[in-house]
Amino acid sequence: MFSNQLVHKLRTGWVVGVLTASLAFSQYTQPISDNGSVDWTQQKIKATGIGAPNPNAPPGAQRAGAITAAKSDAFRNLLATARGMFLTSETTVNNAIVESDVIKTRVEGFLRGFTVVDTRYMSDQSVEVDVEVPLSGLAEALLPQAFGGGRLMTAQPVCPMCGQPWPQGKPVPPGVQLTNPAVGAGSQAAASVSGGTFTGLIIEGKGLGLMPAMAPKVVDENGEEVYGSKYVSREFAVKQGMVGYDKDVNAARNNQRVTNNPLIIKGLKAGGTNKTDVVVSNADAQRIHAAAQTQNFLDKCRVMFVLD
């Protein structure tokens, strides 16, 4: 028979394994270049570099030369990965680099400060290094200085039957009671975890073909900005990214970015050339702004998108 101590270890190992697998499943990583990717969940750019020893160098210097070559290759792969990222729904990081030598210098300078997180010495004497940089440094170099200035829309009563905003000036039929958009009824909005003040926003975007970006937006059916640079503090946008990404709505719900009671909204479609913006219904747009009145989670970038 198993001892109690052994059973406890087996159970603990099983729980840790399940949690680790769950985290890995929900983590949103986007491969971009052959040896580079963006971990949007942890807000990092990662790349691998490979270096071979110079056979003409003295034997004692060959390994050091291979390490230097691997780091140079890793930098090139980081740069290729960064260039391939979407900045907005209409532009890539590469567009910004091509258009401005100042931005190019800033981006390249930041990427050269990468951190080596793993080094592997191969049997053929070559060396592989894994490196990473935080997205915050790239955001500091790329995001415009002009942020904020947007005003949350005034809450408009909602039809309890269809969930759409009630037209201003239209008489309310007897027996019909309009709904507060912060509560909503019959709209596209999903249920929150519990009642009370909302502490963040989750946009459910599975099946929409939505792509991650550094500066995405949420817009209503008329194309009006509901969430984006107009409603965000640049400090928070740089520090933690404008949006967090995940592949699982339950994992997103438990993410510290949106804390303990996020408002969950179903997106209608992806917007923009790069498919990085999310269109929500006009009623849900009002609901988002009504919920943000009490605790402005939009300003603090407490927003997550759930993608395929």
Image: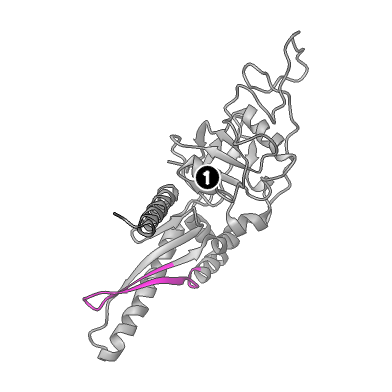
Compared with residue 254, is residue 186 higher up or lower down, i.e. above or below?
Answer: above
Q: Is residue 143 visible?
A: no
Residue drawn at (57%, 66%) of the image:
102
Look at the image and tell me in which quarter the C terminus lies: top left
From the viewer's perspective, tell me whether residue 175 is left or right of residue 103. right
Image location of residue 256, percent across then percent down: 58, 51
**In the image, residue 112 lies in the stretch drawn in magenta:** yes
Which colour scheme appears in the figure? one colour
Q: How many marks?
A: 1
Residue drawn at (74%, 47%) of the image:
149
Residue 121 occupies quadrant: bottom left
| Residues rendered magenta in the picture | 111-131
Mark 1: amino acid? Ala
Image location of residue 265, percent across then percent down: 57, 34
Which residue corresponds to mark 1?
Answer: 252
From the viewer's perspective, tell me whether residue 123 is left or right of residue 295. left
From the viewer's perspective, tell me whether residue 160 is left or right of residue 78. right
From the viewer's side, name the closer residue of 29 and 137: 29
Secondary structure of the residue carrying tag 1 is: helix
Image location of residue 109, percent across then percent down: 52, 71
Residue 282 occupies quadrant: top right
Residue drawn at (47%, 57%) of the image:
94
Q: Is residue 20 visible?
A: yes
Mark 1, Cα crowd under 10 Å, few <14 / some 14-19 / many 20+, is: many
**In the image, residue 235 lies in the stretch drawn in magenta:** no
From the viewer's side, name the closer residue of 195 and 108: 195
Look at the image and tell me in which quarter the N terminus lies: bottom left
Compared with residue 192, is residue 51 higher up or lower down, i.e. above or below?
Answer: below
Compared with residue 185, is residue 123 higher up or lower down, i.e. above or below?
Answer: below
Image location of residue 56, percent across then percent down: 23, 87
Residue drawn at (46%, 54%) of the image:
85
